[in-house]
Image (cartoon, helix red, strand yellow):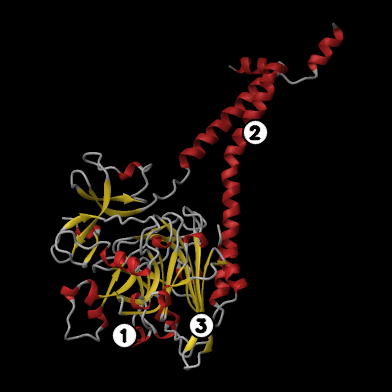
Amino acid sequence: MLEMLKKIWHNPRLRNKAVLGVVLFVLAILLIYSLLTREPPPPEGAIRVVICEDCGETYATRIKDIDDPGDKRNKCRVCGGKLALAWKCRECKFEFPENKIASDGKLDNTMKKYQAVVNANRCPNCGSLATAPMSKDELK
Amino acid sequence: MQSTKMIRKNFFSLIEILMVLIVIAILATLLLPYLNEARVQAKYTRWVAYNRNLSNDPSCIVNFNFQGAGGTFSAKPPDDILVNSAAGAESDGFSPQFYNGYLLNKNGGAHNFEWVRAGRYGKFKWALQFNGSDTYVCVPTTTAVDFTPTDGFTLMCWVKFDRLSFGDTIFSKSLWGTANDAAAQYDMYYNPYAGSFGQGSFDVDVFETCGTWMSTHVDFDKAGWVHFALRYKWTHNDSEGKPCGEITAFINGEPLGDFLDTTNENPNTATATGYQPCIDMQVPLILGGAGCYTKYWDKKNWDSSDPTSLANNWLIKFNFQGKMDEFVVFKRPLPDAEIFGHYDMGRE
């Protein structure tokens, strides 16, 4: 082994290649170490209660933008269906998907806007206004 | 032949050049993240100094820097409180701790906030993740944050939206009710109905005025941190002696210009009808939600025999989903340059 190292050291061409090889090896190790120990950024979004519009499954999961079709988290974990944020009526305890109001810029009139606000998430079961997005504490 | 050999000996081979490029690439991959981190840390350090300076402004009454208490900016903030670092020297008998923000759950029980090291300066800056369903921050003492139409004040904050949805309320000191019965001192919330969805538009209620900006006036990077400011400046009393003021909202340090005064346009449908009930009932300042009248939004739980009790009248709706990492209140109308300065010194 020592003889082989001596032979390499005394041959300028081999010595250059060996030094380069060692440098590359050390750098590669450093690179891999650096990549492995890099702190991953915290996950985006918040824990929300969602409801599947297809199968009705309700569960809590981390969601950033439920309307983002590119986000894989926005698919039902059971059937792969479309998810919506889950709302619950405080009066009749009915759980329902968040209403999507047409937001096409045609509600500039304040009266229409006001009505849209009031009716946005009226309970579809009993008509109550006492509705709110479900909290993870409310899951059975 | 000899000269050809000489010439060839003076050049690097392709392999040698490639090897050098590989070494440079690996070194760059290793070092660039650290260089970028050093740049971000330098900006963070500059912001820390600026924020401490804000606290010493005599008219600053609330300064939530969302960092550790007692000046240890790198420490994790307390789990259930936003510490107010403002000195508030101008206010008589002012104690900053009375204006601490409490992290609460609107359904009761332990709060569901998350503290994340993902503020404007990445891992150096803590941010509070609001979940859009039950999280809100309450500043229970109202005295120093109660303003009248003859006052002037400025509120500024840094937020990052997870999703822009109707009513995402950044802050409020209001009781939303019906068109004819609501109260507001000041609030600011997202409203997609003033224009095409996605571009973004904001509504404010200040005393008896509801203002909205058309989406063409409001455009910002929806994926990034956004700086909001709301300023009210008393200007004069009208011929009937009624105080009149100037309301200006700023996004990323720039004033939004004239707003559509929805109160005057549709007087019967105005949603902000007066500030007096807010003071009488000591409605607190809320971050991440809007105070609403129970009697309109949750009739079943409203006790008509106790109409003056805030606990009976007040609930939180329109919760905001996203992050917030700075919130300040000044009891004076800051000039445009100071508001731009706050944005400029705090941006990523």
- Residue at left offset 63%, top offset 18%: A5
- Residue B55 visible in the picture: yes
Q: Picture coordinates of residue B49 (x, y %)?
A: 59, 68
Q: Which mark is residue B24?
A: 2
- The amino acid marked with disc number 2 is Ile
The image quadrant that residue A98 belongs to is bottom left
- The amino acid marked with disc number 1 is Met
Callouts 2 and 3 in the same chain: yes
Q: Badges 2 and 1: C-beta atoms under 8 Å apart?
A: no
In this view, A134 is above or below B208: above
Depth check, mark 2 against mark 3: the one in front is: 3
- Find disc 1 in the rendering and name its residue: B281
- The amino acid marked with disc number 3 is Gly
Q: Picture coordinates of residue B90 (x, y %)?
A: 53, 87
- Find disc 3 in the rendering and name its residue: B245
Mark 2 and mark 3: span between their CA atoms?
61 Å
Depth check, mark 2 against mark 1: the one in front is: 1
- Residue at left offset 29%, top offset 42%: A75
Callouts 1 and 3 in the same chain: yes
Mark 1 and mark 3: span between their CA atoms?
24 Å
Q: Quadrant of the C terminus of chain B?
A: bottom right
Q: Badges 1 and 3: C-beta atoms under 8 Å apart?
A: no
Mark 2 and mark 1: span between their CA atoms?
67 Å
Callouts 2 and 1 in the same chain: yes
